[in-house]
Image: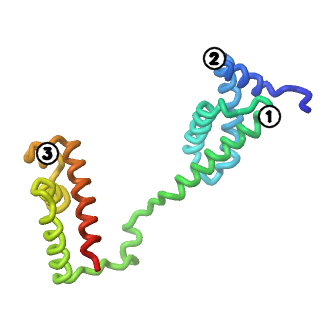
Amino acid sequence: MQLTEDPLATLLKAANADDRQAYARFLHAVTPIVRGIVRARSRSLPPDQHEDIVQDVLLGIHLKRHTWDAAHPLRPWLYAITRYKIIDAYRKRGVAVHLPIEDYSELLPAEDIASPLTARDDRAEVDHLLGQLDPRSAEVVRALALRDETQAEVSARLQISPANLRVTLHRAMKRMAALGRRDQP
């Protein structure tokens, strides 16, 4: 049994009952708490990311405030949201590591150059698959995927809207993939 009620819980209860002023006071009171947790738990993240995490937490609170059960303490619910947003920030950081390639260019193995026969065989297979498409789809694939023309150029030349051009390309590539799988032994 709790002897004194948490003032934050009181504010969030009122906010969930559509009291906008209580919600504003709740956000104003909870922000320094969230900021302190983020700073303590995100020491290995760059400091400029801390405020982004705080904003993510506040957005998460806003979107999920209806899930808090007033019969339970507020702070564990609040800490859980904060914890998960910090974990998300670490995950995002782990995905993209940027290293200048110039520092490692001498250590990286060079790409093997395909033999002319292999390249010719691939080209023959592509031509075979393109021959099985309708002429308009085949031209869209040739223009966008093989000749690297811009969408604007192809759209104007073939008199197709950019949206229709993307759909045509997507369907043609999907059809070619299916045809290629069917031709595999």
Look at label 3 and name its amino acid. Answer: Ser
Instruction: Specify few, some or many for label 1: CA neighbours under 10 Å numbering under 14, 14-19, or 20 or more.
Output: some
| In the rendered image, the vertical position of residue 144 relative to residue 126, given as above or below | above
Residue at (38, 66) in percent of width and height: 101
Residue carrying label 2:
20
| In the rendered image, the vertical position of residue 21 relative to residue 154, given as above or below | above
Look at label 2 and name its amino acid. Answer: Arg
Q: CA distance from mark 1 to mark 2?
A: 21 Å
Instruction: Specify few, some or many for label 2: CA neighbours under 10 Å numbering under 14, 14-19, or 20 or more.
Output: few
Element at label 1: loop
Residue carrying label 1:
73
Looking at the image, residue 102 sits to the left or right of residue 144; the answer is right
> Which color scheme does this rendered protein use?
rainbow
Residue 133 appears at what percent x and percent y?
Answer: 15, 60
Quadrant assignment, res 32:
top right
Residue 117 appears at what percent x and percent y?
Answer: 17, 83
Residue carrying label 3:
155
Label 1 vs 2, first from the N-terminus: 2
Instruction: Specify few, some or many for label 3: CA neighbours under 10 Å numbering under 14, 14-19, or 20 or more.
Output: some
Instruction: Determine the residue located farthest toward the left in the rendered image.
Output: 157
